[in-house]
Image: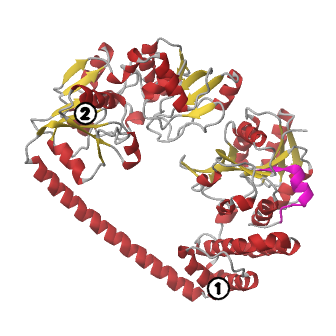
């Protein structure tokens, strides 16, 4: 008996089915069966399913004689399932690497619950991805497993079947099955969660939910969306059979139904224009039929509920028009306020530029408003230690203010205090350029610290690299370099590159990177404290994985399956995964053997914590070399990287 039965219905998804099936079969966890159901698809889905079944014995091909729809196709897959848990995956979606391993581990840690709810991310044709906005509801803190009454907010999640692992014995005992229709997930998911004696959550993106430009049933204008009424009739029929659950949950499900009906009506890509009035009248009938006081809607939803109860298309249209006009007025007022505020700030800055420069002030920043880090962070600490008579300030966005030491003033970009500091501070220190509107005064000293030893082409050397330059304004780049008084260089190679790639009248200071000084000072106790803060178990070997970004890609796609790497290394290893700052997000989900440290402000601390470094073309390799520990370069796309970005030498 396999651990999982992964059921994939397929209908008119031939362009995506290969990727879907591969995402399952290439999982690091292998104890599963894959049941691919060809729902009598008129395209090549049936042939694709057979090809994969011939190739891999874990794949079972099921062919339906007629098209029955998504729900019944899933039922057909369940008839063949033998696994402990059922996982549903639509034929145009994919499992993320390592997700089955994470699901299996979470099920084991939570005593085999009836239902495990995990997270998803929407992926768009443009290459962008966005995690579920309600991901916080899947937090793993607190007791687990639990009942729905302990965390009723789970009902706010998208009511779909593919973000859950279902214990097959529980599903069969309760007699759950999918109905036919557009909105077949509602009468499956609501009864499932309410009936489950034990539920657990997994705070990890396990499914990439593809947002197709065309072809999605739910984004097709048709009368098929009237199916939503039949599906909620089934949900409330369930309450007739289970009066023990009705008292506790019927009011909340009623509220969710009204919200759902209003959402379908409000979407322009759902209902034909000549059926909108009929839809509202039917919604009014459902409102009156199933009305269940006891779970009042929030303030913003209350008016929508009133309009559904009235069932008047004219009233709803008037309300929508009023909302649009009100929103337009607010946007107009906000734009006017923004213009006035900008004009006042520009005036304020011009006034500050006429006042004397303060010799006892220094302002620092790093990575375009990120937290206290890198060479500017090390220099800011040195200012406070060796020149305490100089007051320091750090420019950072509010979400990074917590990284700034208490003895340093925090500045938010774009504020009056920010412009005052730029206009009147004697010392300006950054590892990237300051705001382009900065007027560098003769009495000011601007120190450009840089943030790494260059392997990849930089500055003017990108002029013949359009994929990497991406519309870089080289005139503005040189104008920024003309403001530099000093450029910090880590070594002779860096000196030669900076002076050629950023030709200007600055003075080069070949003094090394101040952020690397801790490598020479740290003790074993310091390393132990860093590991403890990162959550690394004592006695484990730590691998730091820190890849750089690819100029020829829009999205971050880690070339390594870190869950698989950690599993192959064994229980005595932990992988620290750090995303490049250009992506601004996690590189991997934190699990038992992988810890995402993308948000950790001090890369030098991560280096100290690591017994070995795995990277590709990142300049972190030059910093880590100071520790005289092993460095592994995983450069499987060297030719593509070299063609797109270019490098100063062959690693």
Tell me: 575 left or right of 521.
right
| Quadrant in the rendering for residue 518 | top left
Q: CA distance from mark 1 to mark 2?
A: 61 Å
Q: Which of the two discs, 1 and 2, labels the residue nearer the N terminus?
A: 1
Tell me: 544 left or right of 200.
left
User: Is residue 140 covered in magenta?
Assistant: no
| Quadrant in the rendering for residue 197 | bottom right
The residue tagged 1 is 309
- Number of callouts: 2
Residue drawn at x 32%, y 71% is: 333
Q: Residue 458 location, x and y as percent?
A: 34, 28
The residue carrying pointer 2 sits among few (fewer than 14), some (14 to 19) or many (20 or more) residues within 10 Å by Cα, namely many
Q: Which range of residues does the magenta coloring cover?
A: 165-179
Residue drawn at x 27%, y 17% is: 511
Which of 522/345 is in front?
Answer: 522
User: Is residue 167 covered in magenta?
Assistant: yes
Tell me: 592 left or right of 432.
right
Q: Residue furthest toward the top?
A: 628
Query: Is residue 24 positioned above or below 569 on the image?
Result: below
Q: Residue 74 location, x and y as percent?
A: 83, 55
């Amino acid at each position: 008996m396999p651990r999982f039965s992964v059921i994939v219905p397929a209908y008119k998804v031939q362009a995506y089915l290969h990727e879907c099936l591969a995402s399952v079969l290439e999982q690091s966890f292998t104890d599963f069966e894959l049941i691919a159901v060809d729902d009598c698809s008129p395209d090549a889905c049936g042939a694709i399913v057979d090809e994969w079944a011939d190739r891999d014995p874990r794949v079972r091909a099921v062919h339906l004689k007629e098209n029955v729809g998504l729900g019944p196709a899933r039922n057909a897959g369940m008839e063949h399932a033998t696994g402990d848990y059922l996982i549903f995956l639509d034929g145009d979606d994919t499992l993320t690497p390592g997700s089955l391993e994470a699901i299996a581990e979470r099920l084991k840690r939570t005593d085999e619950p009836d239902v495990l709810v995990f997270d998803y991310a929407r992926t768009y044709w443009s290459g962008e991805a966005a995690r579920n906005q309600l991901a916080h509801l899947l937090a793993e803190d607190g007791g687990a497993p639990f009942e729905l009454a302990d965390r009723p907010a789970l009902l706010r999640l998208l009511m779909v079947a593919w973000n859950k692992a279902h214990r097959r014995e529980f599903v069969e005992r309760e007699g759950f099955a999918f109905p036919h229709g557009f909105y077949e997930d509602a009468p499956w998911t609501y009864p499932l969660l309410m009936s489950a004696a034990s539920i657990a959550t997994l705070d990890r993106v396990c499914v990439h939910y593809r947002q197709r430009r065309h072809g999605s049933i739910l984004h097709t204008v048709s009368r098929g969306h009237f199916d939503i009424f039949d599906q909620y009739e089934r949900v409330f029929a369930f309450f007739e059979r289970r009066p023990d659950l009705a008292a506790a949950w019927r009011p909340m499900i009623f509220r969710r139904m009204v919200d759902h009906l209003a959402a379908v009506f409000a979407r322009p890509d759902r209902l034909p224009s000549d059926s909108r009035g009929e839809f509202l009248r039917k919604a009014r009938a459902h409102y009156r039929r199933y009305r269940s006081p006891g779970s009042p809607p929030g303030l913003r939803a209350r008016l929508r509920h009133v309009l559904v109860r009235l069932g008047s298309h004219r009233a709803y249209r008037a309300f929508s028009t009023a909302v649009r006009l009100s929103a337009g007025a607010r946007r107009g007022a906000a734009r006017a306020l923004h213009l006035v505020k900008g004009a006042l700030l520009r005036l304020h800055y011009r006034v500050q530029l006429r006042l004397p420069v303060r010799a006892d002030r220094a302002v620092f920043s790093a990575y375009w408003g990120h937290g206290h880090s890198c060479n500017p962070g090390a220099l800011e600490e040195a200012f406070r230690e060796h020149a305490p008579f100089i007051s320091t300030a750090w420019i950072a966005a509010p979400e990074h203010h917590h990284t700034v030491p208490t003895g340093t003033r925090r500045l938010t970009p774009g504020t009056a205090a920010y412009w005052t500091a730029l206009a009147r501070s004697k010392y300006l220190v950054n590892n990237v350029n300051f705001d382009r509107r900065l007027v560098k005064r003769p009495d000011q000293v601007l120190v450009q610290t840089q943030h790494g030893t260059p392997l990849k082409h930089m500055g003017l050397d990108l002029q013949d690299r359009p994929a990497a330059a991406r519309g870089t304004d080289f005139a503005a780049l040189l104008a920024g370099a003309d403001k530099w008084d000093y450029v910090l260089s880590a070594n002779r190679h860096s000196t030669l590159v900076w002076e050629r790639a950023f030709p200007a009248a600055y003075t080069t200071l070949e003094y090394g990177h101040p952020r690397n000084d801790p490598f020479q000072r740290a003790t074993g106790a310091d390393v132990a404290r860093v590991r403890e803060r990162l959550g690394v178990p004592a006695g484990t070997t730590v691998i730091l994985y820190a890849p750089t970004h690819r100029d020829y890609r829009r999205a971050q796609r880690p070339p390594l399956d870190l869950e698989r790497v950690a599993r192959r290394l064994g229980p005595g290893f932990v992988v620290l995964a750090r995303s490049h700052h250009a992506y601004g997000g996690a590189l991997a989900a934190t699990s038992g053997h992988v810890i995402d440290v993308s948000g950790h402000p001090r890369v030098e601390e991560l280096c100290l914590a690591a017994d070995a470094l795995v990277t590709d073309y990142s300049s972190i390799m030059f910093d880590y070399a100071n520790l005289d520990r092993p460095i592994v370069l995983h450069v499987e796309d060297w030719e593509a990287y070299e063609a797109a970005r270019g490098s100063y030498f062959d690693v």
